Amino acid sequence: MTVDRSNIGDSSKAITFDVEKGAIVKFAEAIGDLQPAYLEGTAAPPTFPTTFNFRLPVASLAAADPARTLHGDQEYAYERSLRAGDRITCVARIADVNEKETRLGTASFVVVETEGRDDAGQLVFTARATVIMR
């Protein structure tokens, strides 16, 4: 599957997620990181936004065959920690698209940047993921 570079800049609709203490605790337990701040809900593990479920900004990406899609890379930059009680509104944007030849054929490497903002509109985190589609 190829993704056209004309999709660069396309954005998803804004979706708001509630950060709940129970979800933080379950996530921390799942990754085996039981720091007191996570168990108290005063902070969430840095990779917690992976639990936010939303569609990618381009319809062709959202409809991609999961068997032919790979999450290749993920990074987060924080302005502050997520904590229980936060309501975070996320918008994902296609930041870059490149095609590369692989041993399995042509693949699209799609870079998706997501901003997470609190109820006051303040930036809390920026996520950057690379999705590999073939």
Image: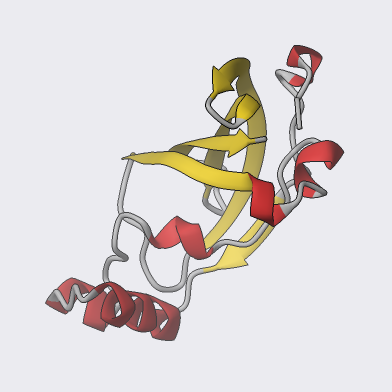
In the picture, residue 31 is in which quadrant? bottom left
Q: Residue at x 29, y 75 (%)?
A: 28
Q: How is the image coloured?
A: secondary structure
What residue lies at 57% left-to-right and 35% top-to-bottom? 132
Image location (x, y in percent) of residue 121: 57, 43
- Going 46% across and 72% down the picture, which residue do you hit? 85
Is residue 123 at least partly visible in the picture? Answer: no
Where in the figure is residue 23, as x and y percent of width and height? 44, 80
Q: Is residue 20 above or below residue 4?
A: below
Work out which quarter of the rendered image holds the C terminus and state it: top right
Q: Is residue 16 visible?
A: yes
Where is 126 relative to 80, above or below? above
Horizontal side of residue 41 vs 115, given as left or right: left
**Quarter location, residue 15:** bottom right
Q: Residue 14 at what x, y percent from top left?
A: 73, 47
Quadrant including the N terminus: top right
Q: Is residue 134 left or right of residue 35?
A: right
Number of numbered markers: 0
Please state if 121 lies on the left or on the right of 25 as rendered: right
- Vertical side of 87 occupied by 22: above or below: below
